[in-house]
Amino acid sequence: LGNLEWSKIFGISSTNDIAKCIIPYRGAFAVSGSRNNSHIAVQNYIFRDFVMGVSASGEKLWEYLSPINELHSFVSGLVEASDGGLFVVSGNGVEVPAGPGFSQMRWHNYAFKLDSNRQVEWGILIRDSLPAISPNNQLTSGIELQDGSGYAVAGNLIARTPENWFFSGVLAKISPDGELLWKRYYQHIAGQGPSHYINDLAQAPDGGFIMVGEVRDTVNAPR
């Protein structure tokens, strides 16, 4: 066990193709990740999500790419839906001018659903008012709920008041049709500038949620 049987290279030479997630899917595997030009571009960025089917022998079976005129990246979760589709946890980008001749990418949390034919059914932003440089806004996990009432996603989100800003843990519920039903913020350390990161999510037997992550006190030691 553990000996290499095969390896495959996917992608094209002009882009970064970064695979992030793999799950069993329809007798084969589904792989998701990001295709982007951030290694050569300083503006006019291309960021696309990809999801592709791969056989047990490493052959590409199919591929979905998000539209080239939209900015999507940071895939961090891939779930086979009960209807045979795929639920994908990702990010939606905003290109922001940062100086003469160059820009920065900033990100909102985003999730979308592909049907069983890999066509987009819906997409939804889980956001606050500010686009923030990733990973300050980044979903890290997603699940389909056991009772069929939709999906849950968790991660990090910048929250802001007129007096303060902070990185909160965030948990949100999405309906089967892609409607944002609710969003909850979580803080363990109150005060100016604490950072809260939820790294994974599971559904508890009573229908609630268990989340794990970390907290950083950016002002007071120990951290």
Image: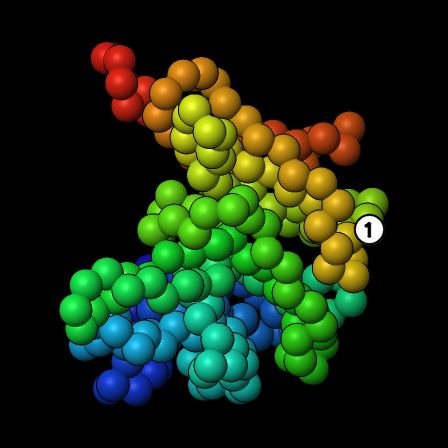
* Position of residue 82 in the picture relative to residue 100 (left or right): right
Please name the residue shown 48% across and 35% down the image.
159
Q: Is residue 54 visible?
A: no
Q: Is residue 84 visible?
A: yes
Label 1 SS:
loop
Please name the residue shown 37% across and 20% down the image.
192
Please name the residue shown 48% across and 40% down the image.
157
Q: Is residue 210 above or below residue 133?
A: above
Please name the residue shown 30% across and 77% down the image.
44
* Position of residue 31 in the picture relative to residue 97 (left or right): right
Image color mode? rainbow
* Position of residue 72 in the picture relative to residue 201 (left or right): left
**What percent of the width, then of the height, locates residue 50?**
47, 75
Residue position marked by numbered label 1 in the rendering? 148
Q: Amino acid at mark 1?
A: Gly
State which quarter of the image contains the N terminus: bottom left
Q: Label 1: how many residues lie within 10 Å, few (<14), some (14-19) or many (20+)?
A: few
Q: Quadrant of residue 106?
A: bottom left
